[in-house]
Image (cartoon, grey):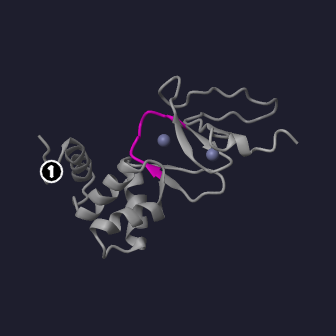
Amino acid sequence: MMQTSAMPGPREARWSATLHAADRRVTRQRLAVLAAVEQAPHATADDVAAAVRADLPHITVQSVYVILADLTDLGLLRRIETPHSPARYETRVGDNHHHAVCTGCGRIEDVDCAVGHAPCLTPEWSPGASRMTIQIAEVLYQGLCDDCRPAAPSHH
Ligand SMILES: [Zn+2]
Ligand SMILES: [Zn+2]
């Protein structure tokens, strides 16, 4: 049976619990931003603002930016940086997964971390380098997706 329910689902309950624990009010704006990012992983702030405005037409882009930054600080969102693109956000946090970006069209795919926790790569320090305690290894795979590959000028 099809049912459209306004009751909060398990993910809203989880988000609310995290917000409460961080002394944040559980607002429609925050939940709408989280839902928008969950629905469109790797969305830019502008994508999120457009999606949220479908439900909350009065929210400003600036508020969306502030909420995204705050939720990222709280660990509910992960912010990723890819070349030639504004920052992107996703709700898949805590698993140290990586990303592959198509240099043709900019599409982004998730790549599972083989190890599952950070850092999954151990640096080979160059001679003379001052060693650091490594916490994160951000791996960005770059290549061409299937849609873009035929257009690549490889036959020239
Ligand atoms: Zn592509
Ligand atoms: Zn991702």
Q: Is mark 1 within 8 Å of ligand 2?
A: no
Q: Is residue 114 above or below residue 33?
A: above
Magenta: main secondary structure: loop
Say left or right for 103 vs 60. right
Q: Nearer the viewer, residue 52 or 66?
A: 52
Q: Residues within 10 Å of mark 1 (few under 14, many from 20)?
A: few
> Does the magenta portion include 93?
yes
Q: What amino acid is labelled 1 in the image?
A: Thr
Which region of the structure is painted magenta? 89-98
Q: Is residue 23 above or below residue 18?
A: below
Q: Is residue 101 above or below residue 67?
A: above
Q: Residue at x 63, y 40 (%)?
A: 145
Q: Residue at x 53, y 40 (%)?
A: 109
Which quadrant of the figure has residue 55? bottom left
What residue did someone put label 1 on?
4
Q: Position of residue 137 (x, y in %)?
A: 59, 35
Q: Nearer the viewer, residue 43 or 138?
A: 43
> Does the magenta portion include 123?
no
Q: Nearer the viewer, residue 85 or 81?
A: 85
